[in-house]
Amino acid sequence: MADEPGRRPLLNPVLRFTKNPRPEGITGGGKNAGGIKTDRLDTQRAILSDQFKTLAETANDHPKFGDRLVVYASMFDDSLAATWTPGDLFNEDRGARLIAPFRSGYLVEIERRQLRYYSALSISADTARDKVDISRVKSIRFFETEDAATGRTLEDMWDDAPEFSGGRAFIVWLMPFTDKAAAEDLLATFGAFRDGVIAPPPPLLAGVTTSDRTTSPAMRRGLLAVKSGDRLNIAMREFRQTGRAKTTVTVPSRDALAELAGSGAVFRLEPVSPITTTSPGEGKEPNRPLPRDMEDLPTVGVVDGGLTASSYQEAQAWKAPVYVKDSQADTKHGNLVSSLVIQGHDWNNNLSLPALYCQVGTVQAVPKPGSGSVDPLDFIAYLDAVMGANPETKVWNFSLNQKHPCDMDNVSLLGHEIAVLARKHAILPIISVGNKPGDRLQPPADCEAAITIGGRQHTCDGSHGAICPVSLPGPGPCCMLKPELSHFSHVRALGGVLIKGSSFSAALTSPLAAHTMARLRDPSPDLVKALMLHNIQGDGFDPAFGFGSPVPSALPWECKPGVVTLQWTASLRPGAAYYWELPIPAALRASGKLKGHGALTAIVNPHPLVTDVAGPNYFSVRLATALQFTKRGKSHNLLGSLDTDKIAEQEARAVDHKWSPIRHHKKEFHGKGFEGDNLRVYARIYARDLYLYDYKSLDEVPPMDVVFVLTLGTGDEDDDVYHQMRDQLGAFVENATIEIDIDIENEGE
């Protein structure tokens, strides 16, 4: 860091709050006559009746499985909230069932013989719940080929798909039927496609060698566990067990692609997309001293083009068996990214960066542009084995992207699968947002479990500056607030070359995440993410900058002078509101009114209630939270909240990102009259689309893990807010950090 003295002053550590919340039960409203759109009920009765009649007359022309067909029920814009899910109209007793959210409505599986019944029911139904649904369903039609192709033409998809042995490569998701007879019929149809329509790709990890003497026993076991079996048979077995599956297939011709897409067996279809890095430039290897105690420093797993720079071999904690051969790997990019992870602050000593060295674990998995395509499901199986073999590595850098924009109604395959791995292995991915050309972020930047990093330029004094002209903006699909952070993207790296791109802003962020993880007493990926969101300069979410950029004056595990930060974790269930009471520090109310600033960040781990078959409803749970004070006997929000119950669902999703797993409220407050001696934090979990997980009621939903980080301060560094809060909380608070020495001494000093 520019002009930084030899050692930073010691600051107060973040505090862990240990008091349990006070839950209060909530009685849900549900559907009733008040939810009927009476102004259009009669019109919709007639429209739906006619449409069901047409479906019945043309049913023989459409794919059927177990004599069931798939229809798309679109909803009016004022009926997209979870409250209006049409599960009462489409229920099992009537031979129908919701399959999954889709576009602006739902996919429904329905028995062919019930189509005429539904035509009559649309006219005659007289219960309040049925009337609510009929008045809110806009139209009914069959699921079509264009739906499986997610709105793209098959010609374009064929042209974009890479050539593999035997044809072109695609990812297919099987239609997630819930009826067992329909599912078995679908599997029979899909299995028959082997006869000229599709072919399986090579077995998983067929190209990865496990005989290298440097391969650890754990790595060898992990790789061998998935290096067998026919890919199509594996997918069909998974579908039979879970009702959901996806797989890579090769398709020999355009006609075969049309047959596959129009079969009704495929819910979603997309071409395999290359995984690439940015083009960096030229440079020679550095010759710089590294700390003597590198083996004691945190390790970042770097999934990139590999590490070949000889001067950095001592900073390599481990190396996975290569996924992409040396002749094809983008080692130039891998060296640059690794150099920034290991000692980015040294290469950029004119920028405001903390002096945080790291080791790297090398995952050589990204080819040079034009050197071939990577099968994404094979890639994920490889990462699963590598992560399982290196459990001590908790932060993973992905400075890579697929060169197409994220679909705003569907989370990408890579984004979803990396999130699944992150939750399984309790790791924090740091992912680049992607670089232009393009108009929005690129997969896997839409990984919910990751911190997605955008780029920004720097000012002449080394602080964060204007929008990066190379880096892509957010937001992400399905209400995700992406990127979360932005960092320097015009930097110097290995060889002294000047480079630019979001790959490098991600690489500069990974050491900060790794050291934060290492400093916490009881770390979790979401907690590190929340603390990093807390330790930023920014006044709210911006599609280019995210929530803001890291500041070096205080690291995420520290409290600045005049500030106190509390963190805690809780398991919350839907159907209740939770409250934590906190004393108001004397400095915040010295004037007789509340005066100061605060920030509240909360992140819910949405697993297992996420699924990539839910389209825009990817998240089946959401969190509402607020910091509240009391005035005239009523509670008021001090830092802001979402009034999602008072605005239309479309607006709540598009503007307020209602279903984002992150809630981040930040505000200054002046002259707020208040009563009592306490503030309180409120939180509530909401759930939707329970049928996707075969739950019948909220009581079956498992508790969801949520991390909270709360900061309060006065703006005056001399105010001892920290010790005032600590003394008042007493036994309900403790240091959140462990004591380690991060004072770095370089060889040769």
Image (cartoon, rainbow, N blue to C red):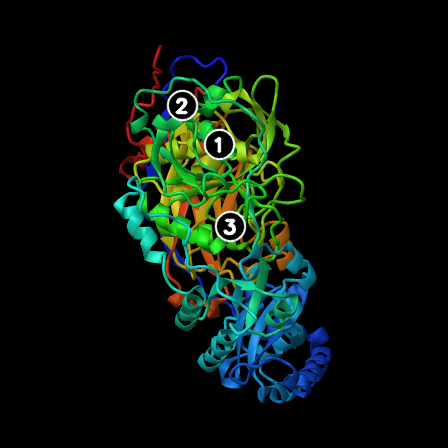
Residue at 61% over, 56% down: 161
The amino acid pointed to by label 3 is: Val
Q: Nearer the viewer, residue 403 or 484?
A: 403
Viewed as shown, does residue 443 lie left or right of 5?
right
Residue at 41% over, 73% down: 240
Percent position (x, y) of residue 619? 50, 57
The amino acid pointed to by label 1 is: Val
Percent position (x, y) of residue 697? 43, 70
Say few, some or many: other residues with alpha carbon within 10 Å of mark 1 (under 14 / 14 to 19 / 20 or more): many
Please say if the residues under marks 2 and 3 sit with CB atoms less than 8 Å apart.
no
In the displayed structure, would residue 109 be above or below residue 517? below
Q: Nearer the viewer, residue 466 or 308?
A: 308
Residue under pointer 2:
311
Quadrant including the C terminus: top left
Secondary structure under tag 3 reads loop
Residue at 67% over, 63% down: 154
The amino acid pointed to by label 2 is: Ser
Return the disc, 1 or 2, that comes first in the chain's sequence. 2
Residue under pointer 3:
374
Residue under pointer 1:
337
* Numbered marks: total: 3
Distance from disc 3 to disc 1, alpha carbons, whole Å, reads 20 Å
Secondary structure under tag 2 reads helix
